[in-house]
Every structure is written in structure tokens, then in C-alpha cells.
Amino acid sequence: MEKMAEDWKERYLQLWKKTTKKQRYLMFGILGLVIAAIIAGSYFYGSKPDLVPLFTNMETKDAGEVAAKLKESKIQYEIQENKQGVTIMVPSRDVHTARLDLATQGLPRGYKGFEIFDDSKLGVTEFQNKVNYLQALQGELTRTIEQIASVEKARVHIVLPEDSLYKKNEKPATASIMLRLKPERKLTKKEIKGIVNLAAHSIQGLTPENITIVDDTGKILNDPDEDEEKGVGNKTITQMEMTRKVQERMQKDVQTLLDEALGEGRAFVRVNVELDFDQRQTDRQTFTPVVEDSGIIRSQQEMSESYTGTSQNPGGPAGVQSNVPGYVAQTENANAQYEKKESTRNYEINEEKQKIIASPGSIRRVNIAVLVNDDITRTQQDSILRSVSSAVGINPERGDTVSVEPLPFNTAEADRKAAEEMAAKARRNRVVYIQLAVVVLVLALAAGALLMQRRRRRLELEAMEEERLAQEALEAQRREAEKRMEDERADLVAAGLLQEEELTLEEKRHLSEREAIEKLIREKPAEVAMLVKTWLSEE
């Protein structure tokens, strides 16, 4: 890190030395301007107060009154206007104080509710009371609607009918509600219905049919005609989707059966299904006759009388008691027998009631067309007809039909598709092979790079080892030369030809050469090692 810093410092110094005096003055001037701009911007933005919203989405009239009060209070403010309304910004240090002061003065006024009657004055006319009551209703309903999470702002207009002596002449109450939704928000059908019911139950004589809700683009949100049309359309789409699914399922089953039996491309199936979506309800009442005594007795009446006596001719002259039925005259020789039985039975009527509701979506008719290649025999065609009829559940009584027709198939398109598929398969195979080749090439390059790195490392180690050996050989030669010189000098001293303290010129030369060699070894060991290596190779 320190070395890098030193390198950069050296580069800057060199660059600075290359610049002229004029260029240096220009650089100092630009640097001064940048510093001055930074200081000025810091002062400007630092001295500017931090503005925060005091009130947002205000009406123009309320915004004007609030701005006038802020000006009287000498509070700095800024007005921002957009399509949602007016927003007043004040410094953050004054926002709470300003809100409290404005609240004590009844600002912003906004929509007033029933508090409009708190400051009622004497001498107010009935018309003014009606107007105030209408404004109070609109204000209260507006406040309530604005509490919904998706609604940003609301406006409510109510029309109350005039009182009439005749009920038939009275007009119904109506209401119009305009909503401004929050960004990226949307009202659901339940929320729209909730707003309609809220308004209908808040105003006397107002029905949901006489309420219109629109958004800020003018689109009607509670259009009953649109809902009805959408409902019919959705119902029709559902029926078509159901019919399509039944046809596809039957066609798939039959096509799979024929492909497994005959092979692919030798038969084609088309199915047409008619579904019955009519809702029918059948009430059936059946009466079963009573057989013999079987049944439930509803009412029963029985009477039985019995009399025994000796009177032979019960009765007597007209007008006497003896002629009363059941009366027996008290005579000595009379014998009489009397018996009377009555029985009445009423049975409940046996009945059976059935209520049958036919579910929509039942199959009304099925038509199947099967096309086979002309090489299919007549026996095979009959077998296909019976198999398809059994698999689908053909019912001739309801008009179901199955037809099997042999036709010579045009195989050009099939052959073309087969050729295209083979070509596509070949292209995919080539792509796979190319990808494999690229992977193998990358792996080979990676392996080669690894081997080259290992070889370079080995060569570096070998060079270092040779350098070390060369240095050792040079050091050995130096020591050998020193030992030879010492031996020669010792011989000369022993022969008395040389004083021990004196050095000859040759010795001095050898000494200076040795010092030079030692200095060279210390300063440039690599070059010396290479030189020794060359000497060794020549030997």
C-alpha cells in the first residue's frame, strides 16, 4: 500500500513538473471556483427553511383565507397547486403553532355538518333553514365517505323533493356523488354498493336507484345497465366455456382411443356437443287408489242395536207408543227380536308428490364425425363406430349421431411437418454437440492453463535452484582463490622473500579484484549466477 502511494505521489510530481506556469494558475482558478460554489450552495440550502405541508388538497377559498391569516401572523409559507387541490407549505418549526392558531379561528372551513346550526341567528327564514339543512346533510355524508381508505376526496349533491299534499305528485329524492380516488387505488363492487346503501339510509326518501356515483373522469361507477349486461355476458361466456371443455374432453378421449388402435395420423375426430342450460322445475302429484282395507282411516262412525223378547208383532195402533221404533209393548204373549248395525269409514287419499329440478348443463345432443384413411376396411369401420358409440355413451333416442367416413388422406402436410421436426431435432442435436464441444474446449483450455502454470512454476524453481548452485560455486571459487593466494604468500614469507606485513602489487591487485567480485555478487547476484552458469556449461 505504501509503495502504491509513493508511485502515485511520484506520478503527480512528474505531472506537476511538466505543467507550465499558466496551466498552474488556471488549475488554481478552477479549484477556487469549485470551492466557492460549494460554499454558496451550502449557505443557500442551509439557510432555506425546511418546508412541510400545513394543509393539503384544500379548496381555493379556504386556501386564500389560510394564506391571509399566515401573512398576518408573519409566518413564511409557500403555495403549491395541482389538480387535487391547493397545498400550503410552512417551515417545520411553525407547523404546529400555525395549525392551532388556524383551528381556533375555524380554518380551514371545509365541509360543514350539522354544526352549521350552532351559530344560528334570529330571524332566519324557512328557506334559509332548508338550505342549511341540505348543506349539513351534504357535509356529513361527504365526511363519512372520505373515511373510506380508497377515497381521497368526495363531493355530494342532494336534491330533496318539495312537499306535496298529494302523494302521487311527490318526486323522489336524488343524490349525485363524485369521488376522487387515491393514486393506484380502485373501488370494488362491494365498496360501491356500500356507498350507495350509506347514502340511501342517510337521507329520507332516497332509494339506491336514484343515486349516481361518478369518478373524477366522469365514469359512472354504479351503472345498473352495465352490471346487467356484464352479468349476461359472463353467463354466456361461462356456457360457451363449459361447452368447449365438454367437447374437448370427448374429442380427446375418442382421439386417444383411435390413435392407440390404428396408430397416429390414421384417424381424426371432431365432436359437437349441445348442452341444455335451461332451468326446469317439475311438480308431480300422483294419487294411489285404496285397495280393500289398506289405507289410513281418516274418520269412522259405527252404530249397533240389539233387542230380544216374546212379542210376535211388535207395534200397535197408530199414534201409540207401541209403534215407536225400538219400543216393545208390555204384553204377556209377545215375542220380539231387533238388531241394527251401521258402520261408516272414511280413508285418506293416497297421494305422492315429486319436485324435480333439472340441473343446467346436461347433454342435449352429441354429434361425432370420424374420418379414417381409405385403407381401413368396412369391418374396421363398423368396429370403430361401435367402439366410439360405447365410449362416449351415444343415445339415439335424444338424437345422437356417429359417422365414420373413409377418405384418402393427404400426407404432404404430415410429411412436411415430420421433415421440419427432423430438421429441428437435427438443429437441436447440433446445438447440443456445439455446446458439448465448447465445454470440452473450455475444460481443455483450463487444463492447459493449469499445466502451463505448473510448468512455469517448475521452471522458476529450477532457475532458482540453478542460481543458488551458481552462487555456491562462485563462493567456492572465491574461497579457493583466497586460499591459493594465502598459500603463495605463506611460501614467499617462508622463503624470506616477503615481509608478513607487506603486500605486493599483485596481492593488492588480487585483493582489489576480490573486493570487486564480492561487491558485484552483492549488487547483481542474478547476472553473476548466469555468468557462472555459462562457464559451467562451457566446461
Image (cartoon, grey):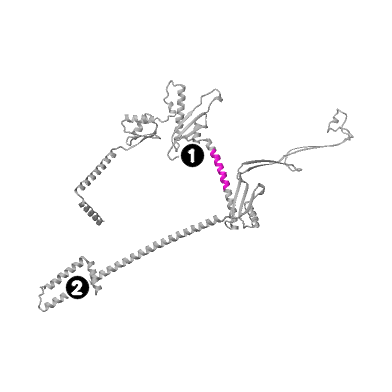
Tell me if 242 is positioned left or right of 60 in this view: right
Residue 203, can we see it? no
Depth check, front residue: 423 or 144 = 423
Q: Which mark is residue 188?
A: 1
What is the spatial separation of the Cα atoms under label 1 and label 2, in whole angstroms? 103 Å
Q: Earlier in the sequence, mark 1 or mark 2?
A: 1
Mark 1 crowd level (few <14, some 14–19, many ≥20, 10 Å Cα): few
Q: Quadrant of residue 463?
A: bottom left
Hey, what amino acid is under mark 2?
A: Arg
Q: Is mark 2 on a helix, strand or loop?
A: helix
Which residues fall within the magenta stretch? 229-244
Residue 365, can we see it? yes
In this picture, is 446 found above or below 209?
Answer: below
Tell me if 197 is positioned left or right of 91 in this view: right
Hey, what amino acid is under mark 1?
A: Thr
**Which SS type dominates the magenta stretch?**
helix
* Number of numbered discs overlaid on the protein picture: 2
Depth check, front residue: 170 or 430 = 430
Which residue is identified by label 2?
A: 479
Residue 193 lies, in percent from the top left, at: 50, 36
Residue 81 lies, in percent from the top left, at: 37, 34
Asked if residue 240 is among those painted magenta in the image, a careful observer would answer: yes
Position of the C terminus by quadrant = bottom left
Mark 2 crowd level (few <14, some 14–19, many ≥20, 10 Å Cα): few
Tell me if 138 is positioned left or right of 470 in this view: right
Asked if residue 153 is among those painted magenta in the image, a careful observer would answer: no
Q: Is mark 1 on a helix, strand or loop?
A: loop
Q: Which residue lies furthest to the right in this view?
A: 333
